[in-house]
Amino acid sequence: MADIWPRNAKVAFIGSHGIRKTTAVHAFANTMQRAGRSVEHGREVVRDNPLGINEAATGEAQLWVLVSQIQQELRLAKHAEVLVLDRGVMDNYAYYLRACDGDDPFDVGPLVRRWSGTYDMVVRLLPDIELRDDGVRSTSDAFRDEVEAILDAELPTLVEERRLVTEQASAIGDRYDWWPLAERLAGLMEEPLFAPGVPRRRPRRTAKPRPDMPQLEMEV
């Protein structure tokens, strides 16, 4: 058995803002590292946007985000077995369409569709928690709902069902069991989850099994 996966994996955690994506990204990356896999983390590029964010963002501003997202992925993809991303092109595209009133003035749709196929697994977190003021992102429920509605319409055309996982944002916390999601990624890659020499580890916390995820059998 090879020491490393022969092909690098890319995982995006997506959705609107304020739904614990960053928390999920770090927790999942840590789980993959515990399995002996090398991991790179891609941060949310929108926070560096010099053209503005939130409700007032223009189409040009969201175009900057889309291009920066792809640039970051190209830069990081070859550095580790697993690249775990805080956002992907799919949810950034939803913000772009919202900023452009549903139009695509820069004709980025074909690029987004092609690039969406480069993710091995996409985890969408659904917004069932209240927005909190972090001093950066909008606290408008209406704005978040508009983005989510666009993502509802666009996501089925961008990501095939077998690569898509959905979870309520409220489930993401200290007791969430990340091992089944890690096993699901390994299954999609058709590779073993655990690196050679890394013992299978039983999670310290328990969580209710997800019916739509294969359950990882742990050795004591």
Image: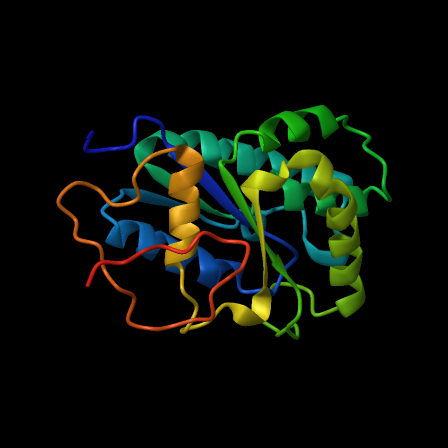
Q: In this picture, is 122 found above or below 24?
A: above
Residue drawn at x 72%, y 35% is 157
Q: How is the image coloured?
A: rainbow
Q: In this picture, is 131 found above or below 27?
A: below
Tell whether 138 sits left or right of 189. right
Residue 111 locus on image (x, y percent) = 66, 25
Tell whether 118 sits left or right of 94. left
Residue drawn at x 63%, y 25% is 114
Q: Residue furthest left?
A: 197
Residue 85 locus on image (x, y percent) = 47, 46
Name the quarter where the N terminus is drawn: top left
Residue 10 vs residue 59, the one in the foreground: 10
Tally of numbered discs: 0
Tell whether 108 sits left or right of 8. right
Q: Quadrant of residue 116?
A: top right
Q: In this picture, is 219 found above or below 58?
A: below
Residue 198 vs residue 218, the one in the foreground: 218
Residue drawn at x 77%, y 28% is 106
Residue drawn at x 51%, y 61% is 210
Residue 111 vs residue 167, the one in the foreground: 167
Name the quarter where the C terminus is drawn: bottom left
Tell me, yes or no, if residue 146 can be seen here.
yes
Residue 8 locus on image (x, y percent) = 36, 31
Residue 77 locus on image (x, y percent) = 40, 32
Tell me, yes or no, if residue 108 can be seen here.
no
Tell whether 29 sits left or right of 12. left
